Every structure is written in C-alpha cells, then in structure tokens.
Amino acid sequence: MLFKRLNGKCQLRRVSNRVGAPFVKTNGKCQILLLTAVVTVLGIAMAVAILEPSYADSPIVKTTTVRSSIPYVATRTDTVSNGIKVSALDYSDFPENLQWILDDRIEELDSKGGFCIAGRVTFNDGAQIYDCGDVQVNFSDKLDEPFLVYYGGWFIARRALDAKYGGSNKRVILRAFYYDAIDTYVTTNEGCITYLELEMTKTSKEELCEIKGTVFDENGNPLEGATVSLYFPSCHFPESELRMVTGPDGQYCFGGITPMRYTVKAHAPGYADCQASCRPSPDSVAVRDLALYPHRRIYLEYVYQPDGSMGFTSGDLVTKALDWKHDNTVSKGLIFSQGTITRLPNDLTLSQRKDILYFRAYYGASEYTNGCYDEGLVDFNSIRTAAEDPSKYMGYRVPSQVGHVYVVKTLKGPRYAKFIVLTDEYSFRTVNPANLKSYRFRGYDLDIDITSCSGSGKIYVRKFYNAPDGLDISYLPYYWEISGLEGLVFKADLALTYNEQDILRLNLPEESLVIYQYDDSTDTWKKVSSRRDSKRNILFAESISTWGLFAIGSD
C-alpha cells in the first residue's frame, strides 16, 4: 500500500488488495515499491510499522481494521447502457479501509432490509478521483440519493435504501464537470449490494462550453463579493460544486465544462440567494445574469395542534435563502405536527424570490398529502376546525403577507397548524442621485419613486402587523415604517397596495380609503393627499419630503 498526504490528511492510494507487488498507477506510470530482500525479522516488523498509515484523521478510514464477520451478499451485473459497460465487482475488490463501510451496509440490510449500491468509477484519461468534488454519483429513480465517493473513485451508498425504490431498470447517474454524463440502468435485489464498475469519457475540447453572467444587487448595479456556485441539479454534497467570487464588475465565468444541465446560484451576505437553470449546447456560451435582493426575515406566532397547544412563538426563518433557528438547530423546514425542527420531508418551507417570501407546502405520499392556504385577516383564535375542509388546501406556493393567518394540514396526524405573520424585517434600496428611479418593494406592497435627492443614501422599509397607535379611525391592521436618507433633501411619491379581501373582511368602503402619516411633532396621524387606483388596488401619495409611519385608513 502507498499513501500520500492531501490537505493535511493521509489518503490511501491502492488499486488492488490482491496478493502481489504493491503498486500505484499515476499518470500512466507505475511506481514500484522495493523492499530490501535481506532484513532481519525485527527489521521487517519495523518496516511494516513505518509503512502502515495512521487513519485517525482520515475521513475514509475507520480506526479499527477488524472486519465484520457477517457474510456478505452481492449481485453481479453485466449490462450495457448508453454505450457504457457496467461490469462486475464484488466486496473483495474494495480497499480494506472501505470494506468496513460495506460491512455497515450489510448489517443494515440484514436488520432493516432494502438494497444498496456500491462500485467504482474511473476516468478514461487516467486522471485521479479523490472524492465527490471530482465526480457525483446518484441513485435517481423516484428518489434522489447521492453516494459517498472516496479516493480512487470508489463509491458507496450512504445508507441502505428502502426496498420500494428498488427493482429492475433503476437509474443511476454520474456527473463530472469535464467528462460526458452517464445515465445507466441497473437491477437491484432485496437484501443485496449491487456492485458496479463504470468509466467516464473525457469530453472533447470541441464540445466544451461556458456559462457566464453578472450578479446585480437590488438596484441593478454589479455586486462585488458575491459567491457564485455551479452544480448539477440533483441532491449533492457541497464539495460537488464549482465556486468563484465576483469582482468589482460583478461578473463570473465557468469555462471549459461539459455541456449538460446545470444550476447556477449566487449568494452574498445580507442577501437572499438567487439561482437559475442552464443547459448550454456543445461549443457555446450561455449567459445567466442573477439579481440579489436583501435577505428578509419574518416573525411568526403559531399553534400546531387543534387543542391550542403552542409551539415556539418567534425565531429566525431560513429556508433555502433563509433559516429558522430553534434549540441551536438550523433546518430547511418546519414539521408543525411535531412542533419540532427537521429536514425534508416537512409540512412547510419558506423561500424568497426577489422581495417576496413564499410559504410552500410539501406534498408527500398520497396517504400523507398536506397543503397550505391563506385565511387572510381574521381573528387568530377563531381558526379551530378549518383544516377539516379539504377544498381550501389548494395553494402550493402562497405569498407571505403581514397580519394574515395561514393554515397548514400536516403530514402526520392528520392535524393542522395555524400561524400568523407578525412582523417583517426591513428591506432597503440604495439611492443614487445620478440615476433616480422608482424602487419597488414587492414583498412589502410598496413602491417609492424618488423624484429628487441631494445625495446618495439608503431607504429602509418595514411593515408591521398590529393597530397603529393613536389612529382613531377605521384602518387596515398593519402599517409601514420608512426611514433613511438622513441629512438629505428629497421628494418622493409613494404607492401603497392594499388587499381587496382585507377591506371586504373589515367592511371598509374602498372609495373612502386614504393614506395617513404619523407626525412626530404633534404625536398625531395626519391625512395625506391621496388618489386611488381601484383597478390595481393602489393608493398614491405625491411629493413626500419626510419619512415616518404610514397607514391606510377610512376617511
């Protein structure tokens, strides 16, 4: 056995565990390890001790070399798919330091059933494979399951897979940025490990493509310091992505890659992630520009059981671009039926597109189908049995609105959860006096058109759910806080959007709606000259020169 140090860790370099002279194939050359023929017994023991690596810091080696005594079972395959021959390997072909992982899978199969897939992939040009950063292997047939990839191209499923996903003609995909994709079909057997051996072909230079673009901020300006990731549109480990950071021009470029379907995603501190799909043709350049908007958070209060039991009442939500933090855990969703945080599958997730947050229900198997709907501005405590009406659960993606009550039919139970959106964290826009324009805060139902400004600065917007203090007329139970541009002289036109269903529920006459602004000097709300567009449900106020609190009420 030979090993070399990579990133401070010992990585085993072995091509066979069969008896014979140990060797390693590197760039087509063989390095022969020669030991002196004349050594004492003590000398041999010392040499073995020196050559045997310590696996304590290696992610692919178990501290003990004792193998499980459990007998293994395997299925051999010998099929051809997409011109790729899938030949036979078995347990004994795997390096000893990986056989203990196979032993763990065998124990799972014996105790829980199911099936497992393992094998080896190589590159036809002899390039070495170190981990899943070089090649991605997935089971992809009604289940998207990435496999662990180890030094030498050996791959093993992370766990025994449920038998319901196994059978004949099951799809396994292999993806690498510089090699032709493989989609092959295999047969799996209950309680068995199916071993595969595949080879990926280097993509010809004539077919290589390029993906490039520019990352913009919320104002359409190039964004410096954004991290752009390129990855295959399937479940994967972070190591399977290509990444780069944008410069002052906001541009990124991934060149010399194999033409296939990719996902490109941009991320920057303080901004929500933005991603786009891309499938460039051979020998082509595909352009995908990405726009990032300020990262939004909201606060919720919710009940997750019909008996009124409360779960946690506030927190930081992050799903995709956002997080919900609770009990020092971070998750991609909420399971309201358990009142806990967990990863998919879940009852509901939250995502951000531009300035808008969306609740999205997860749809499981038919017997666990769930859903979500917006009940609107209603008394939170009045929602008790709404979940019993299945006709309401029509929404797959529902926009988040401050003050609205949402109901989720949970995966388990069946139960329902109800929650109310309390407060939006602020969003902002940067004003450039040389390029004045209208700034749209879509998730806040607000547009601000800056008509004049004496300098550069930021506008901050928040939207609250509760009764505006001191407003002694009929009003919508939410208001806006606008701030920023301190020390500058400006003029702005506002456009506040109202929900038609909200005014119907509150019995407010639409023709009487006007905008009110809070006057700090007198501690009173004052009516602002307003005009109404009833077709688009918008109220306009012109020539605003001071910021503060704004609300919609009945004149």
Image (cartoon, rainbow, N blue to C red):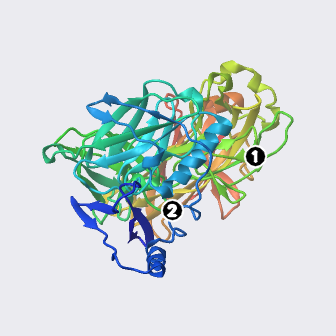
* Residue 390: % across, % down: 69, 20
Q: Earlier in the sequence, mark 2 or mark 1?
A: 2
In terms of depth relative to the viewer, which is nearer, 515 or 267? 267
* Residue 150: % across, % down: 43, 55
Is disc 2 in contact with disc 1, using a CB cutoff of under 8 Å?
no
User: Which residue in the structure is indicated by mark 1?
Assistant: 472
Q: Is residue 2 visible?
A: yes
Residue drawn at point x = 54 percent, y = 42 percent = 530
Determine the image quadrant of residue 249: bottom left
In terms of depth relative to the viewer, which is nearer, 430 or 492? 430
Say what secondary structure mark 1 lies in.
loop
Closest to the camera, between mark 2 and mark 1, is: 2
Left or right of residue 487: residue 465:
right
Viewport quadrant of the N terminus: bottom left
Q: Is residue 218 visible?
A: no
Residue drawn at point x = 73 percent, y = 20 percent = 389
Q: Which residue is most to the right?
A: 307
* Residue 367: % across, % down: 67, 22
Work out how far the residue at label 2 is from the one at label 1, CA to CA, in angstroms: 66 Å
